[in-house]
Image (cartoon, rainbow, N blue to C red):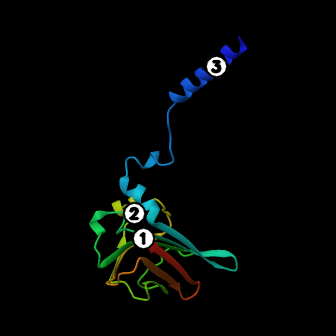
């Protein structure tokens, strides 16, 4: 009798578990497919001085995320930067730069924080400034190595598989 009741209880548990709502880690990406792809191609780095964060760097490689940017010769990124204790940093005037394989960018365009591109990236910082950065890249390398260089806070490297 105990065996039959044990099987019945086990059956009920399995039955109700099978009917339960399934959730997954990617459920919140269902409406935004671009954001779901972008999470795989987004990197974040911190620049530390005396164990304190002085700059936050966010980089999303768009060539693998959006077909609109899938050009073999142009590498396109969304670049976000926040310099600590600085309200308005400007990529063009401040003392930092982003290099791909030691080459400067082909173009750098500031993005509004409300733009669709910025909204679609999974890792956002409300205090960061975002830029659409394009690099010429005629080399057939499998890995892209970018260096963020700040004259005061140092350098960090980010790499992406092509």
Quarter assignment of residue 112: bottom left
> CA separation, marks 2 and 1?
7 Å
Q: Which disc is residue 118 wearing?
A: 2
Q: Nearer the viewer, mark 1 or mark 3?
A: 3
Asked if residue 128 is positioned above or below residue 91 in the image, the reply reads above
Quarter occupied by the N terminus: top right
Residue 10 point in image, percent of width and height: 63, 23
CA neighbours of label 2 inside 10 A, class few (<14), some (14 to 19), many (20+): many
In this picture, residue 9 sits left or right of residue 32 = right
Q: Earlier in the sequence, mark 2 or mark 1?
A: 2
- Which residue position holds label 3? 7
Quarter assignment of residue 52: bottom right
Asked if residue 13 is positioned above or below residue 76 in the image, the reply reads above
Residue 22 point in image, percent of width and height: 50, 36
Outermost residue, right side: 2
Quarter occupied by the C terminus: bottom left
Q: Are marks 1 and 3 in contact (CB under 8 Å)?
A: no
Residue 85 point in image, percent of width and height: 58, 74
> CA separation, marks 1 and 3?
59 Å
Q: Residue at x 50, y 40 (%)?
A: 23
CA neighbours of label 3 inside 10 A, class few (<14), some (14 to 19), many (20+): few
Classify mark 1: helix, strand or loop. strand
Quarter assignment of residue 98: bottom left
- Which residue position holds label 1? 130
CA neighbours of label 1 inside 10 A, class few (<14), some (14 to 19), many (20+): many
Q: Are marks 2 and 1 in contact (CB under 8 Å)?
A: yes
């Amino acid at each position: 009798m105990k065996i039959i009741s044990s099987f019945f209880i086990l059956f009920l548990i399995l039955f109700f578990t099978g009917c339960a709502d399934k959730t997954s880690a990617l459920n919140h990406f269902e409406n935004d497919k671009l954001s779901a792809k972008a999470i795989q191609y987004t990197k974040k780095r911190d620049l530390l001085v005396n164990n304190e964060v002085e700059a936050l760097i966010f980089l999303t490689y768009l060539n693998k995320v959006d077909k609109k940017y899938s050009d073999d010769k142009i590498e396109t990124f969304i670049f976000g930067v926040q310099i600590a204790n600085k309200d308005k940093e400007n990529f063009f005037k401040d003392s930092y730069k982003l290099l791909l394989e030691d080459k400067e960018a082909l173009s750098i365009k500031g993005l509004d924080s409300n733009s669709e591109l910025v909204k679609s990236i999974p890792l956002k910082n409300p205090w960061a400034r975002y830029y659409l950065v394009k690099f010429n890249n005629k080399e057939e390398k499998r890995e892209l190595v970018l260096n963020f260089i700040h004259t005061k806070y140092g350098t960090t490297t980010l790499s992406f598989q092509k």
